Image (spheres, rainbow, N blue to C red):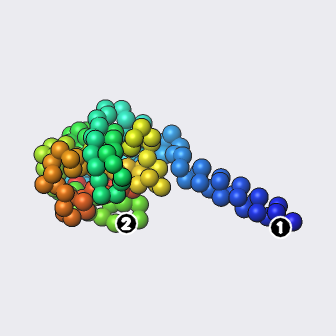
Amino acid sequence: MKNLRLVCAGFLLLVSVLASSVLADDAVVLTVDGRIAGDTAVDFTLADLQALGMERIETTTPWHDGVMVFEGVPLSRLMAHVGAQGDNLTAIALNDFYAEIPISDAAAYDVLLAYRANGSILTVRDKGPLFLIYPFDRFPDLRNELYYSRSIWQLRRLTVR
């Protein structure tokens, strides 16, 4: 009986891990609101973000070993798509952590809203489903706490201010 309980517990853990790492095709992964065209919040699925076109950044980060290859939509392209009319973003993570980010960073540093790392779709366990990443290797002056704090992972909402 004890072995059966262990097998069942292991099975339930496996199902839980698989469920937490796979997104439904129609799952909203990002909401953009605030000072945008139409003044109505816009929800994005992963497919919606992929349709905006993919770019990549190869960089080291303080959170990973070695060079990482991040793929996603450039933040400047996303801001143009929603008609952002502000100067700042409040980026909010799944756990309600937030960071204030000047929209000017998007173009100045080619900031990426990554949904892939090293070829794999980001899951919550990997700091996903979205990770706002700066190209730290291309701009060494970004290697400091200010820009590290703006590289928010498990991103869920962007509010344009």
Label 2 Cα neighbours within 10 Å, binned few <14 / some 14-19 / many ≥20: few
Place residue 57 in its image quadrant.
Answer: top left
Which residue type carries mark 2? Asp
Q: Mark number for residue 96?
A: 2
Q: Tell me what residue is drawn at x 71 percent, y 55 percent.
A: 11
The answer to whether residue 128 is left or right of residue 1 is left
Q: Is residue 17 visible?
A: yes
The answer to whether residue 156 is left or right of residue 100 is right
Q: Quadrant of the N terminus?
A: bottom right
Q: Mark number for residue 2?
A: 1
Q: Tell me what residue is drawn at x 33 percent, y 48 percent.
A: 66
Spot occupied by residue 55 in the image (x, y as percentages of width and height): 28, 35
| 2 or 1: tag closer to the N-terminus | 1
Q: Quadrant of the C terminus?
A: bottom left
Which residue type carries mark 1? Lys
Q: Callout 1: helix, strand or loop?
A: helix
Q: Which residue is more in the foreground, 139 or 133?
A: 139
